[in-house]
Amino acid sequence: MGVSINPKDMVGGGGLLNDVDVVVVKSEAAMFDYGGKAKPAPCCRWQLESEGEVYDQYWSVGSNQEWKATADGKSFDSIGKAEHLSKSSNFALLMNSLVDAGYPAGKITDDVSAFTGLSCHVIRVPEPERPGLNRAKRKSADGREYENTVLIVSEIHKLPWESDAATPENTSGGQIDETGLATEVLVEVLADGKPLKKTAIATTIFKSTDPRLSDTKTKNRVMKVAISEDFLKNGPWEYDGATLKMG
């Protein structure tokens, strides 16, 4: 049996897909060399289908000195001294987002392939800060830097073993007005007069220090509202389909 991939068992220590509905066509443990740019390292690979297109997405699991993907692609085996996966990995961020979105933690064991068939909505959020381990920012052809991001699950439409769509439990108890809160956060950011790109909205909500967004499940619901076209078209700002700015 391989190492547990349940976030509770972890220890501290193309264009980019963003803001789309996807289906996990295949989920597996794999060794990935980042397009020949590095030595093969253990990753979780999801083959994702969205609007008729198929994408490969990888989440780093840890060091290739500590872990390797099993031959059957279902799990990760320790080849070093580590006994638990790290909470600071991109894979940990994915697993925690799954649980926060309503995936039963008790269903997560060591089998990565169990996520095959999951239908969900995914968004990008900033990579966690890892002192001494942070990667250099991505650069475009013209030299501009872009923040490194991680793809996470913001909403689950259907769990792998379900035949019909299921809605995660709303734990806010109706006390949080997601639309009102999303509006407040964006208006505050736009108050300095600078425009805000739609692609930066999820990151803006994710980084907000508003105490009402301290709960991850609430934050995910607010992000879902904030990136919806209906919300953006009807807010107290000007919206051209790509950018928000105060009039």
Image (cartoon, rainbow, N blue to C red):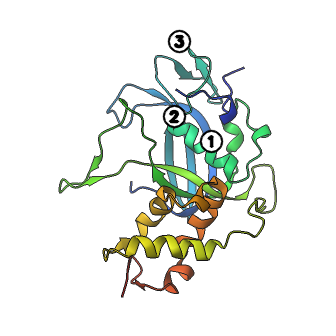
Q: Distance between the residues labelled 2 and 1?
A: 11 Å
Q: Which one is in front in this view, the residue at disc 3 or the one at disc 2?
A: 2
Q: Which one is in front in this view, the residue at disc 2 or the one at disc 1?
A: 2
Residue found farthest to the left: 142
Percent from the top left, x then y, of residue 58? 49, 41
Q: Specify the amino acid type for callout 1.
A: Met
Q: Which of marks 2 and 1 is nearer the N terminus?
A: 2
Relative side of 156 to 69, left or right: right
Relative side of 180 to 89, left or right: right
Q: Distance between the residues labelled 3 and 2?
A: 18 Å
Q: Specify the amino acid type for callout 2.
A: Ser
Residue found farthest to the front: 211
Residue at horizontal 55%, vertical 72%?
182
Q: Which of marks 3 and 2 is nearer the N terminus?
A: 3
Q: Mark 2 points at which residue?
A: 88
Q: Is 132 in front, or is 47?
A: 132
Tell me, yes or no, whether the two marked residues, 3 and 1, touch with CB atoms within 8 Å. Answer: no
Q: Which mark is residue 80?
A: 3
Q: Name the secondary structure under disc 2.
A: loop
Q: Residue 95 carries which label?
A: 1
Residue at horizontal 50%, vertical 27%?
62
Q: Is 21 in front, or is 98?
A: 98
The reply to whether residue 6 is in sight is no
Percent from the top left, x then y, of residue 102? 73, 52
